[in-house]
């Protein structure tokens, strides 16, 4: 099964790293290191999916592809 793409980037404003999952609206997390941000967004993903299932919401299929992969 294909999994969701995760972006991790440094935020000068927040003085730390942000990780987000574009396919899951508002699913993001913060960490002082890239590894912390990734660990936290994986927890956020599980929580997001758990709530969506409980509320019988549509769960989007993984579809986001960064532009660099779309060109190849």
Image (spheres, rainbow, N blue to C red):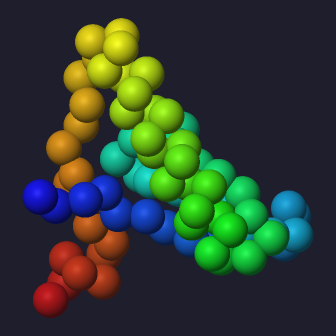
Decide if residue 13 is on the left or right side of residue 55: right
In the foreground, 62 or 39: 39
In the foreground, 49 or 20: 49
List x then y, in percent, for residue 62: 22, 52
Decide if residue 54 is on the left or right side of residue 60: right
Give the answer, above or below, for where 56 lies relative to 66. Answer: above
In the foreground, 72 or 58: 58
The N terminus appears in which quarter of the rendering? bottom left
Count of residue discs = 0
The C terminus appears in which quarter of the rendering? bottom left
Decide if residue 69 is on the left or right side of residue 40: left
List x then y, in percent, for residue 26: 54, 38
Q: Residue at x 74, y 76 (%)?
A: 33
List x then y, in percent, for residue 16: 80, 70
Q: Residue at x 35, y 14 (%)?
A: 54
Give the answer, above or below, for where 16 lies relative to 60. Answer: below
Q: Residue furthest top?
A: 55
Q: Residue at x 49, y 54 (%)?
A: 42
In the foreground, 65 or 27: 27
Visible in this render: residue 70? Answer: yes
Decide if residue 37 is on the left or right side of residue 70: right
List x then y, in percent, for residue 40: 62, 55
Q: Residue at x 24, y 23 (%)?
A: 58
Visible in this render: residue 11? Answer: no
């Amino acid at each position: 099964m294909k999994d969701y793409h995760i972006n991790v980037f440094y935020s000068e404003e927040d003085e730390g790293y942000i990780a987000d999952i574009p396919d899951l609206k508002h699913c993001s997390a913060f960490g002082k290191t890239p590894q912390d941000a990734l660990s936290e967004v994986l927890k956020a993903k599980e929580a997001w999916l758990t709530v969506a299932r409980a509320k019988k919401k549509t769960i989007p299929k993984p579809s986001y592809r960064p532009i660099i992969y779309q060109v190849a």
